[in-house]
Amino acid sequence: MNLFEATRNHIHHRLLDLGFIHQESVIIIYSLQMVFVTCGVLLRYESNEMIAAVYLGLAASVFAVLNLAERSGWRFAENRRRSGQEKIMAHDMMRKILVVVPRRFLSIGIPLYLLLTVLTIERVPGDFAKLALLVSVLMVLELFFGVGPHSVMRRALVYITAAFVVYLGISYRLEWMEFLEPVNTGFFVLTAIAFVTAVKFSPRRRKIEFNTTATDYLVVLLLMAVLVASKGNLWGNEGIMFVVQMVVLFYGCELLITEKRSRWGGLTITALVTSVILVVRGLFLN
């Protein structure tokens, strides 16, 4: 086995030989890397011997599973994968769980998060209120005169509003809200899971319109690994917390925007109401 040349002995090619397609192989490798990184963070205060033992154990497990699959002749055949998914989706209850529930969670959870957060922050700085006023005006113009629900302008306005809410929710959080931090963390973990599930088990139309790559899964896995590894300590670092929450929220918003067919979408209306609340609180109630 050559460690520096792309021979058939490398993990990626061995997964391809087992019947996985390129994207599936890359996602599996990314997932394994996230496991190693997460373990490294969790064990950062342990002894070198413990870290080495865990690393060798995980590495040995990976190659043991590969060897077992190869020796047994197991193959992840395309027809088996398609047949299995068709059987799952044919069951009405599983269809609701894998398609309807994640999408419903995103369509209700994200607007609810925006409104509750903007109503429970300590105060809204004047600069944010003025920017929110501009966003509100542009949002109204976009709703009435925009080219459609998927325009770049509408996406930008929704993203800006979401970024405002995430930043203010972190920087101007009320003291008693710190007790609800596990709930907040749970919301973002569930949002990431709902996004991945909604895209993975979506109807063909949504998969085509919302085209995902292995990098998208890597980003989501990375964010979930950071959330798990933090054990609550991550929230002391407001910069990292802002990035994690914002990326998860942006992915969820993008999926909702992509699916929307009508001009007056629930997320867009919520973004408009949220920006108006920011204006009122920042300019008149401070």
Image (cartoon, rainbow, N blue to C red):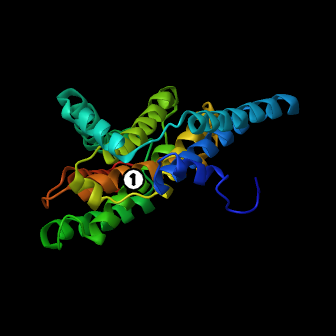
When asked about the image quadrant of residue 153, the answer is bottom left
Please give the name of the residue rendered at 30% of the width and 71% of the height, measured from the top-left corner.
152
Please give the name of the residue rendered at 32% of the width and 68% of the height, measured from the top-left corner.
134
Return the residue nearer the eye: 20 or 207: 20
Q: Secondary structure at mark 1?
A: helix
10 Å crowding of disc 1: few (<14), some (14-19), many (20+): some
Name the kind of residue labelled 1 in the image: Tyr
Report whether 191 appears left or right of 214: left
Please give the name of the residue rendered at 42% of the width and 59% of the height, measured from the top-left corner.
128
- Residue 118 visible here: no
When asked about the image quadrant of residue 127, the answer is bottom left
- Residue 232 visible here: yes
Tag count: 1
Q: Position of residue 32 (x, y in %)?
A: 61, 42
Q: Position of residue 39 (x, y in %)?
A: 69, 35
- Circle 1 sits on which residue? 251
Report whether 146 appears left or right of 138: left
Return the residue nearer the eye: 263 or 31: 31
Report whether 203 appears left or right of 132: left
Q: Position of residue 165 (x, y in %)?
A: 41, 50
Tell me if residue 173 comes above or below residue 182 in the rendering: below
Q: Position of residue 162 (x, y in %)?
A: 38, 54
Return the residue nearer the eye: 170 or 66: 66
Please give the name of the residue rendered at 72% of the width and 34% of the height, measured from the top-left corner.
60
When asked about the image quadrant of residue 279, the answer is bottom left
